Amino acid sequence: MTRIKLITVTVAVLAAALAFAAPAFAWTHGQFSATTDACAGCHVAHAAQAPNLLKAGPTQTEFCFLCHGDGGTSAPYDVKNGYTEVTVGTDTYQYPSTGGGFDYQLTFTDSNDNGLFDLGEPTASAAITSRHTVWGYNHDDKNTAGSWAGESAKIFSVPGGTNTFTGSGFVCGSCHDPHDGGAVPDASGYITGSASSPNPRLLRRTITVGNATYSNLYMKFKFQTVGTFTYGNPAVASGVYRVVEYLCDYGVTQATTYGSSVWCGACHNKFNPRYWTGAGLNFFGTMKRHPVYGHAVLPTGANGTLDTGTPLETDTYPIGPVISHYVGCLTCHRAHSTTATVAGWASNWPRDAGGTSSTSALLRMNNRGICYNCHGAAKYNCINDTRIIYGTNGTCTSCHQ
């Protein structure tokens, strides 16, 4: 049996092991041939157990977990338990998911204090505290992610959104398009969604919420090749990729082409994320929000890593040499879930629909660590700080020499 080990592997050794790895492709989710067998991987014509002729159910979540959880061996990405599994040589490794798992999250001890997961560092599975509540799970309650309830548990409302889901409510397929795969990183490690190219991670290019449809939703990620995974019968060896950087196109026109704020804003449309506006303005009714896609510079000592910090989005077309990083939804929040805890003042905050909430809200750090990581003790206070170029009387030289 292949051993599961977590050992220190130098970059040179890992690169050599992967140098001749077969190119990756989503054999189930894309690159279909005219006589593909991929349809039968998910669908059955006359004896389906779930809507859309899915082979298992009754919820779409349970169906997806067949490969992406529950000990499934048909995909390297276990989104139920929060890790990515790869093979390097004869050994198998597990990386913590950067998006989070729906039940658990593989965590690690940053023993060398570089903010990244390294092979050889201790790991453990931690229970999550909040999730994007897909079909089958109850609402989060009092700092605890809702329990599994099955087919009857459906979520239709959208926090921070004016539209509601119909049918089965919010499901995996609300965000992911299972038939829009096949994108592989280019020579520099990037996958860039466009009208003619799939988004990374099967992310939808068009999202429908009730009667509202949002199109031209593109994302760009940078990936690191971390190993291989063997699919199917006959076996197909494929590369496995881990997200290491989020990118955006915010700088040239301030009308975003791609980036997490625009993409997430399809559902959470109250936050008006497509265009930059200064702080202090109302974004929906009387509500105000933290600015997104404002030029940001993390203070000295801040953790900006994807794994444990608040990662800024890198602008593909920066304005000048220094305005190159921006705040997006994924700077503060994870996509699937978090293990962050909230207490004290952080455990009770207003909701856009009224009332209060105690959820950890997919935050990347405990309590309001995400705030302190960027702002310190209000040392870097807001976008109206005169050191910021977009602020009142702000200039580049307020921050940069």
Image (spheres, grey):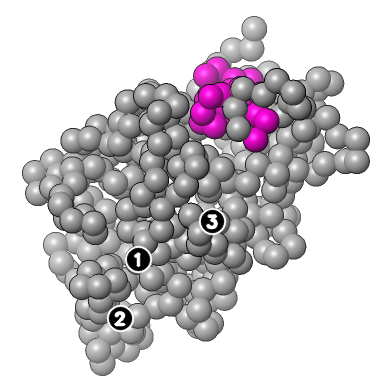
The mark nearer the N terminus, 1 or 2, is: 1
Q: Residue at x 14, y 44 (%)?
A: 347
Three-letter amino acid code at disc 2? Answer: Gly
Q: Which residue is mark 3?
A: 208
Q: Which residue is mark 1?
A: 270
The location of residue 304, given as percent across then percent down, is 38, 55
The furthest residue to the top: 1
Q: Is residue 45 left or right of residue 11?
A: right
Q: CA distance from mark 2 to mark 3?
A: 29 Å
The furthest residue to the bottom: 393
The location of residue 170, given as percent across then percent down, is 45, 43
The image shows a total of numbered marks equal to 3
Q: Is residue 255 left or right of residue 180?
A: left
The mark nearer the N terminus, 2 or 3, is: 3
Front residue of 28 and 390:
28
Q: Residue at x 50, y 62 (%)?
A: 212
The mark nearer the N terminus, 3 or 1, is: 3
Q: Residue at x 57, y 75 (%)?
A: 317
Three-letter amino acid code at disc 1? Answer: Lys
Residue 51: say if magenta. Answer: no
Q: Residues within 10 Å of mark 3 (few under 14, many from 20)?
A: some
Q: Which residue is mark 2?
A: 278
Identify the element where label 3 is drawn.
strand
